[in-house]
Amino acid sequence: MVVKRQNHMNDNKLQEVQVGDTVTRMLAGAVPMPLKVTGVTEDRIYCGPWEFSRRNGAEIDEEMDWDEQHSGSFIKP
């Protein structure tokens, strides 16, 4: 299942996320999973083995062909 992630006004809070913060991963848009932020770059947020777009929170996974527009999960601050 691919969940299309739309931009929302709260997404600008993703720019404020820092290492050590806790975010919520929404698997398939419905299953919440708290994750600790382990790294950040200008355009990515890392939570252990997971990588997310800092622009809209979409999970990025090349093996599953997930990107900012088509992803199976997303994070929210």
Image (cartoon, rainbow, N blue to C red):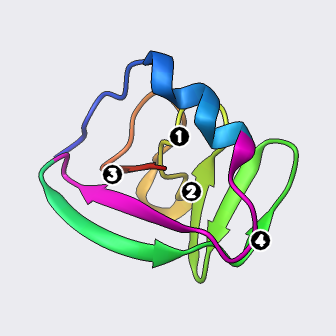
Identify residue type, mark 2.
Answer: Glu
Identify residue type, mark 1.
Answer: Asp
Mark 2 residue element: helix
State the mark number for residue 73.
3
Q: Which marked residue is nearer to the observer: mark 1 or mark 4?
A: 4
Mark 1 residue element: loop
Residue 17 lies, with reference to residue 12, above or below; the image says: below
Q: Is residue 49 left or right of residue 20?
A: left
Residue 12 lies, with reference to residue 2, above or below; the image says: above
Which of the two residues, 10 or 40, is positioned nearer the viewer here? 10
Mark 3 residue element: strand
Label 4, label 2: how far apart the Cα atoms are: 19 Å
Label 1, label 2: how far apart the Cα atoms are: 7 Å
Question: In the rendered image, which residue does mark 4 sit on?
Answer: 39
Q: Residue at x 55, y 52 (%)?
A: 60
Question: In the rendered image, which residue does mark 1 sit on?
Answer: 67
Question: In the rendered image, which residue does mark 2 sit on?
Answer: 62
Residue 14 lies, with reference to residue 50, above or below; the image says: above
State the mark number for residue 5.
none
Q: Residue at x 48, y 52 (%)?
A: 59
Label 1, label 4: how far apart the Cα atoms are: 18 Å
Mark 4 residue element: strand
Answer whether residue 24 is magenta in the image: yes
- The answer to whether the residues at label 2 and label 3 have Cβ atoms under 8 Å apart is no
Label 2, label 3: how far apart the Cα atoms are: 13 Å
- The answer to whether the residues at label 4 and label 2 have Cβ atoms under 8 Å apart is no
Label 4, label 3: how far apart the Cα atoms are: 18 Å
- State the image coordinates of residue 75 (x, y, percent, origin top left): 43, 51
Q: Which marked residue is nearer to the observer: mark 1 or mark 2?
A: 1
Quadrant of the rendered structure where residue 14 is? Answer: top right
